[in-house]
Image (tube, rainbow, N blue to C red):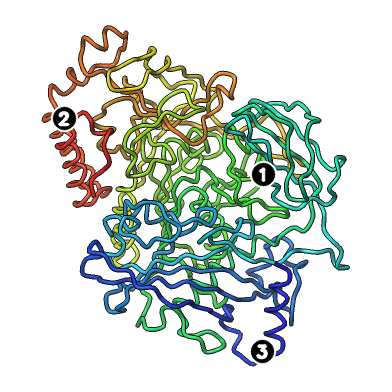
């Protein structure tokens, strides 16, 4: 990477800087467009896939960049710091068919995931086949889909979007070193290597301590049986313990100035909106568009946290003081939803939750959009603090599921640190927060039935939320372009009794089950110890540890007699359930219990008949007792879907898909894929 940066900087120096300094994207290198056309694109017609490279620079002394960690230690040419990253664009071939809106799809660790959730498409990092575009929703709407690399830690791979960012050095040019912690949770006995996030400063046994523990917040036991494979990898003497946490602390070198990645996104989007060509006269990928009316961003999980982090550090203001993104839809972030990005030795790919990376930076104050005072640290901050000062805040529709409440403290998005309800729409009128009840983190549209996972006690949760994102994108566009207000925030509330401590959740007692057509399931066991809890961390030492025993108050939704959540946006499959849907799952005994099992949820099916459930000792009414027959079930599903559409959380086309699925498959609803 150092050589690539040096060659590019040298080229610019030889050419000379006689160009205007307004556009911080200096050069766009575009590949030949590839035409893609399927019937699902509707009247918009053919799309072009345009890939290429962004080359740009930032001024480390600009006030917008002073909060970038180690920016003052980055190499410069003519006082500027250089970056380079790939981009990926899907746009209508005919600019007249474009709707004038950019849909910025924030990558998830360099992967492209937006079409999966917005188009109900098959996963692909290079969508070219018909299945990769699903039912074509974004294309039928005429959106221009934009993606770019921004994280310097993304490992290279086919069609993965990373970034080339500078390495910080000491003022005298010497190498910076520092303690780094990384983890590995093996899935099988022979997972015996750990890839290091930064190169080891010295490849010798004295540079590193390896420990193993069963629980995220447990105490580790030292392991002597390990060795360096090279400066980027260690190997463990196997076999290992699947589900246990192997933590390695060592002295690393060459920290990347990772916080610069947000500047790449800011600069690229600003360029697409305001410029027809780069400094070298190369045409921009959207140079034939008359105008960009709005830019919306969407990202899930890591991509959702990237949006919040982007906003927190003030990058929604470009270098001319203009707003960059008009509307954000971050999903699956949890409270704070920070990215471990603007740090020395940052690890933006990490995700802090109950079991894995328990003490990784992510949930530290500020947890909320509005500016508040933290009673545990005395800090005054909010995710909107910087954009409020520059009048560059976007409109925000923030979405979390139940898994983020259990695994990432999501209740702190709409309460203060002590768990009291906030009047969000008064404190932050540009923000709505929606909790999608009883959903896990990872469900895809085409999951044919709940899955049995190697490390989880119960089957996974099949409730799918992509339908909601389509409706919210329509609401966002109406909000930005017509000032038509979106639905009010819908979240569990302490005031109405639906937001409670995990100790107060009242689940039914569900025995081990062996229902016809389903795998045998163990007894449902609940303990509030599954809940992820978090307090201020001491970041002065590695690994990071809590400063005190004080914790932020994390709460979850109360449940009904079936164990299904009462509060939030309740999907038709939850209003008219075929079983108990949980946003969380637990690991098996000896492999992490009672820690949460990844970001999975749980599904425990109902018996078909009263006789069957009584034989099993299941207290939950059977399908026969609830609905009578499959036709009545389908009618209830249709009614629930229509009501959700009236509330603004479903489109007519999705009501029709959901209803058709219920009528065609009846009680086997979760055993077949959602129709396109």
Q: Residue at x 78, y 50 (%)?
A: 231
Dividing the picture into quarters, in which one does residue 183 lie?
A: top right
Q: Position of residue 434 (x, y in %)?
A: 38, 45
User: Whole-Å distance between the Cαs marked 3 and 1?
Assistant: 46 Å
The residue beneath circle 2 is: 633
Which label's residue is closer to the chain start, 3 or 1?
A: 3
| Other-residue count near label 3 (Cα within 10 Å), few / some / many at <14 / 14–19 / ≥20 | few
Residue toward you, 352 or 603:
603
Which label's residue is closer to the chain start, 2 or 1?
A: 1
- Secondary structure beneath disc 3? loop
Q: Position of residue 420 (x, y in %)?
A: 49, 35
Dividing the picture into quarters, in which one does residue 550 lie?
A: top right
Q: Position of residue 448 (x, y in %)?
A: 31, 37
The residue beneath circle 3 is: 17
- In screen coordinates, is 287 left or right of 191? left
The tag on residue 378 is 1
Mark 2 or 1, which is nearer the eye?
2
Mark 3 or 1, which is nearer the eye?
3
Which label's residue is closer to the chain start, 2 or 3?
A: 3
């Amino acid at each position: 990477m150092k050589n690539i940066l040096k060659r590019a900087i040298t080229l610019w120096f030889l050419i000379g800087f006689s160009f205007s300094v307004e556009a911080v994207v200096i050069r766009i290198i575009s590949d030949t467009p590839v035409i893609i056309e399927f019937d699902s694109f509707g009247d918009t017609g053919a799309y072009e896939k345009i890939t290429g490279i962004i080359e740009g620079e930032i001024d480390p002394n600009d006030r917008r960049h002073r909060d970038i960690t180690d920016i003052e230690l980055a190499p410069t040419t003519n006082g500027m710091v250089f970056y380079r990253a790939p981009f990926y664009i899907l746009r209508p071939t005919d600019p007249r068919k474009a709707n004038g809106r950019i849909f910025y799809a924030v990558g998830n660790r360099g992967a492209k995931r937006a079409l999966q959730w917005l188009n109900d498409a098959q996963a692909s990092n290079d969508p070219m086949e018909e299945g990769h575009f699903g039912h074509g929703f974004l294309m039928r709407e005429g959106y221009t889909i934009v993606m770019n690399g921004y994280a310097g830690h993304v490992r290279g791979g086919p069609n993965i979007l990373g970034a080339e960012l500078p390495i910080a050095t000491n003022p005298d040019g010497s190498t910076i070193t520092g303690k780094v912690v990384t983890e590995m949770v093996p899935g099988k006995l022979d997972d015996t290597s750990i890839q290091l996030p930064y190169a080891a400063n010295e490849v010798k046994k004295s540079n590193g301590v390896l420990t193993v523990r069963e629980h995220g917040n447990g105490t580790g036991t030292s392991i002597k049986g390990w060795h360096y494979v090279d400066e980027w990898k260690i190997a463990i003497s196997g076999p290992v313990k699947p589900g246990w946490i192997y933590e390695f602390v060592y002295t690393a070198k060459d920290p990347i100035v990772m916080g610069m990645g947000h500047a790449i996104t800011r600069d690229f989007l600003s360029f697409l909106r305001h410029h027809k060509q780069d400094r070298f006269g190369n045409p921009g990928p959207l140079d034939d568009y008359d105008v960009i009316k709005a830019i919306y961003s969407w990202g899930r999980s890591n991509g959702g946290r990237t949006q919040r982090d982007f906003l927190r550090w003030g990058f929604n203001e470009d270098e001319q003081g203009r707003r960059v993104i008009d509307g954000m839809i971050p999903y699956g972030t949890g409270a704070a939803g920070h990215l471990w990005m603007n740090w020395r030795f940052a690890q933006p790919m990490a995700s802090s939750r109950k079991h894995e990376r328990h003490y990784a930076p992510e949930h530290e104050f500020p947890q909320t959009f509005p500016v508040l005072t933290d009673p545990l640290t005395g800090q005054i901050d909010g995710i909107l603090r910087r954009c409020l000062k520059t009048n560059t805040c976007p409109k925000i529709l923030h979405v979390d599921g139940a898994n983020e409440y259990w695994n990432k403290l999501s209740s702190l998005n709409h309460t203060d640190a002590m768990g009291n309800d906030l009047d969000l729409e008064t404190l932050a009128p540009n923000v709505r927060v929606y909790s999608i009840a009883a959903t896990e983190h990872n469900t895809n549209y085409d999951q044919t039935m709940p899955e049995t996972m190697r490390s989880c006690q119960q089957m996974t949760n099949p409730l799918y939320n992509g339908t909601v994102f389509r409706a919210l994108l329509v609401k966002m566009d109406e909000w930005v372009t017509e000032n038509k207000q979106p639905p009010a925030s819908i979240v569990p509330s302490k005031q109405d009794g639906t937001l409670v401590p995990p100790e107060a959740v009242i689940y039914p007692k569900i025995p081990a089950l062996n229902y016809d057509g389903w795998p045998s399931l163990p007894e449902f066991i609940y303990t509030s110890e599954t809940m992820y809890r978090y307090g201020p961390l001491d970041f002065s030492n590695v690994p990071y540890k809590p400063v005190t025993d004080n914790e932020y108050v994390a709460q979850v939704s109360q449940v009904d007699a079936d164990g299904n959540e009462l509060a939030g946006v309740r999907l038709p499959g939850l209003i008219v359930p075929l079983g108990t849907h949980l946003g969380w799952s637990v690991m098996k005994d000896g492999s992490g219990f009672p820690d949460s099992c990844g970001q999975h949820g749980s599904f425990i099916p109902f018996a078909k008949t009263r006789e069957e459930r009584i034989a099993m000792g299941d207290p939950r009414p059977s399908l026969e007792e609830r609905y009578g027959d499959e036709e009545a079930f389908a009618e209830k599903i249709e009614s629930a879907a229509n009501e959700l559409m009236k509330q603004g959380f479903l489109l007519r086309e999705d009501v029709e898909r959901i209803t058709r699925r219920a009528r065609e498959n009846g009680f086997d609803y979760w055993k077949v894929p959602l129709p396109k």
